[in-house]
Image: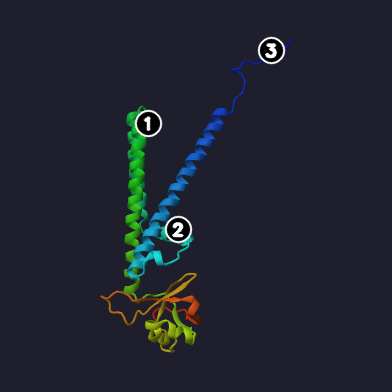
Amino acid sequence: MTKKPSPSSAPSSSPARTDWIKIIGEAGLILALVTAWLYLAGWRFAYNYFDAFGVGISAVEIKREFILTYGFWVLREFTWWVLSTALVLLGLIWLWRWSNKGRDPMIIAAITIVAIVTFFFFGHWMGGLAGKQRFDGLRAKGFPGFNSVRVWVTAKDVEDLGSLTPLLKSLASPNACFKKLYADSKHLYVFDPVADEPNLPITVTKIPLSAVRMTRIQESSNNCGL
């Protein structure tokens, strides 16, 4: 007669499985927090950047991947600030957990939440600062890398657009000196970097794409002419 293995001697994989589930859960949480931080920093970057041009971010269709790209720009601009802030906050959380030895999980959870909120606050602040700094840097150099643009609209649309008529006619001129700021699914945004004095706000013109018959874009750095 064979003996049945006792419950204590039977192999069990529950602890290992639990550890893996915990690791995957924590990794997913960290990834979600990092993505949310990048999105917040990128959104604030876009808000301040377009606001410096006089364009409200609510009026511009910005794809989510662009927002995340702006967030990476903020991270690149303030790499040491971000890493230092994250390490300090993580160190404080670890020190608090070590000093309490896990006896008061509610306080540990509260400290963790405060640390996360603080980290997101710094991300929001850094994003706004990076957006304004990027605009100031581009303006000081004459907006290098922005494409020069000429725009033609239909004759009917020129008359219908009223106050924009003189500007739209000048946009199609061979001597036009306008830069393309952005284009979404409904509008084209252009601005004149030459006519604006350094201390005056940039004037951006929003042209409905439905009125655009043709555009000609030429890559240029400091030369605005076409």
Residue for badge 2? 68
Quadrant assignment for the N terminus: top right
Q: Residues within 10 Å of mark 1 (few under 14, many from 20)?
A: few
Residue at the image point whose x is 39% and y is 55% from the top: 40
Closer to the camera: disc 1 or disc 3? 1
Pick whichever of labels 1 and 3 is earlier in the sequence. 3
Disc with the residue nearer the chain's start (2 vs 3) = 3
Along the line of sight, the residue nearer the viewer: 164 or 170: 164
Q: Is residue 161 above or below residue 73?
A: below
Asked whether disc 2 touches disc 1, contact meaning CB atoms under 8 Å apart, the reply is no
Q: Which image quadrant for residue 60?
A: bottom left
- Asked if the residue under mark 3 is in contact with the one under mark 1, i.e. CB atoms within 8 Å, the reply is no
In the picture, the disc for residue 3 is: 3
Q: CA distance from mark 2 to mark 1?
A: 34 Å
Quadrant position of residue 73: bottom left
> How many labels were placed on the picture?
3
Label 3 environment density (alpha carbons within 10 Å; few <14, some 14–19, many ≥20): few
Circle 2: element type: helix
Q: At label 3, which amino acid type do we have?
A: Lys
